[in-house]
Image (tube, rainbow, N blue to C red):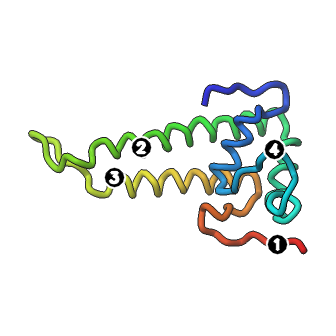
């Protein structure tokens, strides 16, 4: 993540990363259509929090974003080693991608916990409520 925070606000790229890491679908150009904060209470809460965190809380979230970006990259980098089982004294961990993905998802859930949000649908929690 190369974006930096300004005084008490996130860039659009940072908000997108928070939504994505928390397991929520793309926000789009705004609150139109049938998807988004108007229909999911947790999504509305997330948008409120992203727009109203203190500077200290923004710094904590920025640290989460940096950690998550590193963990996400490590998963894709591990994919480059899937074709090698053993090389000299090095032996591939056959569970590396799964273990890295689990660590990544754990940190995603920690970010959700810090923001006081249930994990989104992409994290498999299924605890979103439809507002009718």
Cα distance between the residues tagged 2 and 4: 29 Å
| Residue on which disc 1 sits | 130
Q: Image point 90% across, 74% down: which residue?
A: 132
Cα distance between the residues tagged 1 and 4: 21 Å
- Secondary structure beneath label 1: loop
Q: Image point 61% across, 61% down: which residue?
A: 122
Report the side of 91 relative to 51 (left or right): left
Cα distance between the residues tagged 2 and 3: 11 Å
Report the side of 52 relative to 68 (left or right): right
| Residue on which disc 3 sits | 96
Report the side of 128 relative to 20 (left or right): right
Q: Earlier in the sequence, mark 3 or mark 4?
A: 4
Contact, mark 3 vs mark 4 (Cβ under 8 Å)? no
Where 43 sits versus 66, above or below?
A: below
Mark drawn on residue 107? none
| Residue on which disc 2 sits | 76
């Amino acid at each position: 993540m190369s974006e930096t925070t300004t005084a008490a606000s996130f860039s659009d790229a940072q908000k997108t990363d928070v939504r994505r890491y928390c397991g929520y679908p793309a926000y789009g150009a705004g609150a139109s259509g049938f998807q988004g904060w108007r229909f999911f209470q947790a999504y509305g809460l997330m948008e409120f929090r992203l727009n109203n965190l203190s500077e200290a809380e923004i710094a904590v979230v920025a640290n989460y974003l940096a950690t998550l970006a590193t963990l996400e990259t490590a998963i894709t980098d591990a994919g480059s080693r899937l074709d090698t089982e053993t090389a000299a004294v090095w032996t591939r961990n056959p569970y590396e991608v799964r273990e890295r993905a689990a660590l990544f998802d754990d940190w995603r859930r920690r970010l959700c916990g810090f923001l006081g949000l249930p994990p989104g649908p992409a994290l498999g929690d299924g605890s979103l409520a439809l507002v009718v």
